[in-house]
Amino acid sequence: MADPLVDHDGLPAALRATVRGDVDFGTTARALTTMDASNYRRVPLGVVAPKDADDVAAALAVCREHGVPVVARGGGTSIAGQATGVGVVLDFTRHMNAIVRIDPDARTAVVQPGVVLDELRTAAGAHGLTFGPDPSTHARCTLGGMIGNNACGAHSVAWGTTADNVRALDVLTYAGERARLGQGWDGLPSRLADGLRALVDGELARLRTGFPELPRRISGYALDALLPERGIDVARAFTGSEGTLGVLTEATLRLVETPGARALAVLGYADESAAADAAPLLLPYGPLTVEGMAADLVGDVPGLPKGGAWLFAEVGGATPDEAAARAAALSRAAVADGAAGHTVVTDPRGQRALWRVREDAAGIATRMADGSEAWPGWEDCAVPPARLGAYLREFRALLARHGLRGAPYGHFGDGCVHVRIDFDLLGEAGVRRFREFSGDLADLVLAHGGSLSGEHGDGQARAELLSRMYGPELVALFECVKDLWDPAGGLNPGILARPHRLDENLRFAVLPRRPVPVEFGYPHDGGDFTAAVRRCVGVAKCRDTSAAGTGVMCPSYRVTREERHSTRGRARLLHEMLAGERGGVVTDGWRSEEVREALDLCLSCKGCRSDCPVGVDMATYKAEFLHHHYAGRLRPAGHYAMGWLPVWLRVVAAARLGSVINAAFRVGSLAALSKRVAGVAAERELPELAPETFTRWLAGRVRARHGDRLEVRSSDQVAVLWPDTFTNHLTPSVGRAAVRVLEAAGKEVVLPGSRGLCCGLTWVSTGQLDHARKVMRRTLDRVGPALGLPLLVLEPSCAATLRTDLPELLPDDPRAAELAASVRTFAQYLEERAPDWEPPRLDRPVVGQTHCHQHAVLGDAAERRLRERIGLTGELSGGCCGLAGNFGFERGHYEVSVACAEEQLLPSVREAPEGAEVLADGFSCRTQLEQLAGRRGRHLAEVLAEALGVPDGEGGRK
């Protein structure tokens, strides 16, 4: 092949002239595809998203003509580096993502390669069927990627690997030949059929003896599937070839029957080796899964039986009682064989919560308990299940010998172990240790009769070591097979056959060696913005587009379905920006328009801070970027109008001009002009200003009740209420309602310190961090003796700013951390400071939304408990309302804002039962509901105040 790094003149134009799909050789497209979920990075020339198989053929023809390699890419969640490439990336997720048909009688499905696994499972579920293999990335991995890697998942003990569930494959070779792969040679081009037949006939002995028999042997090419006694299964042999032999355009897959009910037996053991020893003993009971995890990864999860490690054994049944009985029988047997404890979970919600711990492990394991980084590379080796306990004991000893740490977990029933290890991949000595350990671990795996890869493929991480597993003669056969399929070497070169070294192309090599100057403290990353960006390892939970559950991340991606609008995509662009002159795709640093455009649709919802298993905090990264991007330059109008909103509102309130402003905004032409000048979307209504601020009302109330002096006998008597901008100037009814509820609970409400307090939220969200810091310092100076007392904040976004942004922007001011620790939500305050107060009962259904900042930063457990106490039944929707502070008001964001609301919030409100209470503690959520649905959402304080009989205008309904 020609050097793929040279500028291939005419390649983009030739592709655009022949391909009907998308052709993108721009900076953003290339930056987004430099990495997958592995340690590796390769920079492509461009990205093509073909419309159909003919488009794939056209793209291959152009690439052949220009001597450019091709790599097929699905969800980009590969962990061994096989979804990256230096030529043209074929992105199958954009257009070739259709389920062609499902045949419930034959129990098969025909799919295009870009179909996400969960979409197939949902469609098949309507017929009581499913696709058996289910890796933990099932909500975003594609069937094409699963076929490329021979993915497996938790249910392989019941339903096998992807190869076990493939019936036929339609592929294109790099030479443009079409093939239909199944059993036998008939679907192959004659050249290829003749060559493979001759190879198999000449190597029968080696093919019959050279491959270990174990359930999770994924490494290398599965040439033994071509043996006559195995049916000459070409489709099976192709599965797991990692895009090196042909390009998949359509697949026919086997579906399996879904059990009518499931139960989860959770079994506790002294340690992971004891759990591993026990796992094979459970297989005779017919479990669907036998998954293992240890305490160093699980952490403090309620409901687990005693132990230092656990097996999750799922069983099925025709009915819930049958499933529960099977789980109980399995548990009894496990206890008899030495399990320290057990529990059976039959509630689907409880099962999902425990499985979520397991599915997030690939991300959680990337950070050790002390915050240090851990990486893949030896993510999925497998040994015979009966050898797993002994292997794990020796594996732990090997880690210690090399001075490394890792937390093994995975598919214990199949002998497959996942682990992330704290390699230092930033320095030469650490990379040498990575290489030395890899060789030693390969030898250990093979000593136990295992496979270097048990699920994710070899890629670049392990292919160099295949000769240790198979010997040089069989590896030479792999190269012969590669040459038969792809004589020009155009498909995913450097992977599997004639591989790159395992310590080449490491993605960290291009990053800065010293921390870059930044504004936030990044306390969980040692103050290093580069380390913060490295958090994104590519597991792509942010690409989950299902509306199930109560998660938030990532609202803009769920609307646009564009990688650059995912948390991972933005992190990739920031990675390339930091790489800069060291080889990054983004070369203009903080001034990058590509990075700015990708971050423009970030709602700063903070959902990734909690929902991302690695804790990426894109809202903070966005604020950081905007600060540097606009340093010394004119900003968008919205940054001045909405970023400085607290100042403008204080000026209007001081001059008592609220009614005048409201009247002016009711004049269409004046409102339109104001919105245009302020950078506000023309479709938006401007919120009304309150005729009287909350702080003015409260001052009058205190004077009326206590005269000129309020005598406080103890801090327990006082409720310190934060006068946030939105409550104070726009919805003082929320503040009034909170006061009446707190008074009913026996508290006297006071404000913290002097006037002019502000959390700085609007300056943070617009990246005006110098001024945000000034506002925060002034606030700390003015809080006075209230510092350290529980601080009740009614607006969730302001509470989240005080809890996180304040100490992270002022890391050297101890008062910031003290104030942050004192922040409480309304429900948290009542639960903590008025535990004996009996709230009124409402006994009606509830709909609405938990504010995204509350979900991400503050949690809503106290709110759930309070709703239960007062009889508000039902769940609030997940996702984000889409207004998200200034985001939904800014010009150019209206359509995305509405689409976010339509994803979960608005449908839940429209479908609410009659008489349902519409709850929305956030000003943005209430505004979005009123403007888009014509429904008035209320803060929980308002609902309680009404139940206490508060007069209209003081917290009740208007």
Image (cartoon, rainbow, N blue to C red):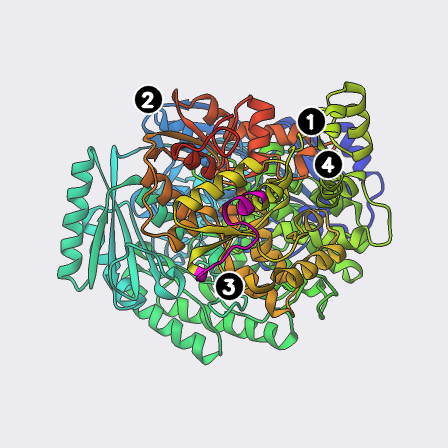
Q: Secondary structure at mark 1?
A: loop
Dot 4 amino acid type: Arg
Q: Nearer the viewer, residue 30 or 538?
A: 538
Viewer-nearest of labels 3 and 1?
A: 1
Q: Secondary structure at mark 4?
A: loop
Q: Which residue is mark 3?
A: 367
Q: Secondary structure at mark 3?
A: loop
Residue 105, label in figure: 2
Indicate which disc, 3 or 1, sits on the residue closer to the N terminus: 3
Dot 3 amino acid type: Arg
- CA gap between label 2 and label 1 equals 52 Å
Viewer-nearest of labels 4 and 2?
A: 4
Quarter residue 605 falls in: top right
Please say if 371 is above or below 580: below
Dot 2 amino acid type: Asp
Q: Which residue is mark 4?
A: 656
Indicate which disc, 4 or 3, sits on the residue closer to the N terminus: 3
Residue 684, label in figure: 1
